Image (cartoon, helix red, strand yellow):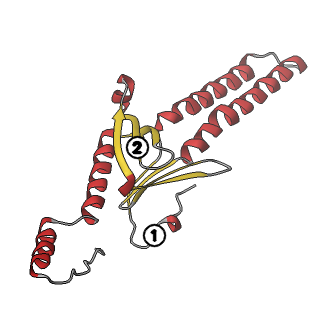
């Protein structure tokens, strides 16, 4: 369930690779602990004989269903949800059996904001909303760990991408000087 490196372009590198905050695993762990406690209590407290064995089998069956549905499934969803920030884009991927991936090029990101409820501030997570140009508009990343640092990193990535693809003051002065002197415009090197 690791994020495949082959989705990256040749010059692209990963800056941040995150899963949702581990608080999502709290319920699966609680289900596992309570389920084990119920099976152990049933084993110790139920009377010997056919009736007790039948009740213990039902409790164990319910425990198995609860662990698979309320324990294993949320873990798989958490593990297969990726928030990947590279020097060129933000990739959002989710899905256990089927997969959904969304790419947000840094050049198209218009705005980003974060929100934290009180409990999220205590846990060090929050929601990051990324607004981009295009049909879909907003992408909402929930339970982002260290959301304040992630938002700052995203800001730095967007600014670096903008600076990479825009003219600097010196380049603009050179172009204006060339135009005043009647020289043909030069191709500028945008690689690097």
Between 48 and 131, the one nearer to me in the picture: 131
Q: In the rendered image, which residue does mark 1 sit on?
A: 9
| Residue sitting nearer the eye, 114 or 18 | 114
48 on left or right of 22? right
Residue 143: mark: none
Q: Position of residue 151 (x, y in %)?
A: 32, 44
Rendering quarter of residue 52:
top right
Which residue is identified by label 2?
131
Count of picture labels: 2
Q: Furthest-bottom residue in view?
A: 183
Q: Position of residue 10 (x, y in %)?
A: 43, 73
Residue 121 drawn above or below residue 163? above
Q: Is residue 118 left or right of residue 41?
A: left
Say which residue appears at 74% left-offset and 23% top-offset: 43
Mark 2 to mark 1 CA distance (whole Å): 23 Å
Q: Secondary structure at mark 1?
A: loop
The quadrant of the image that shows the N terminus is: bottom right
Q: Residue at horizontal 68%, vertical 22%?
A: 38
């Amino acid at each position: 369930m690791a994020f495949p490196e082959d989705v990256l372009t040749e010059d692209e590198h990963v800056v941040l690779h995150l899963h949702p905050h581990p608080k999502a695993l709290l319920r699966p762990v609680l289900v596992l602990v309570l389920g084990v406690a119920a099976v152990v209590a049933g084993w110790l407290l139920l009377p010997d004989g056919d009736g007790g064995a039948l009740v213990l089998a039902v409790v164990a069956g319910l425990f198995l269903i609860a662990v698979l549905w309320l324990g294993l499934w949320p873990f798989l969803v958490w593990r297969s949800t990726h928030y990947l920030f590279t020097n060129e884009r933000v990739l959002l991927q989710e899905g256990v059996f089927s997969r959904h991936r969304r790419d947000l090029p840094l050049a198209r990101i218009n705005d980003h904001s974060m929100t934290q409820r009180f409990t999220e501030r205590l846990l060090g997570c929050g929601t990051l909303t990324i607004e981009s140009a295009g049909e879909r508009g907003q992408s909402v990343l929930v339970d982002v760990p260290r959301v304040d640092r992630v938002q700052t990193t995203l800001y730095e990535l967007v600014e670096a991408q903008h600076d990479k693809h825009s003219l600097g003051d010196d380049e603009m002065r050179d172009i204006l000087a060339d135009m005043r002197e009647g020289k043909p415009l030069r191709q500028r090197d945008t690689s690097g």
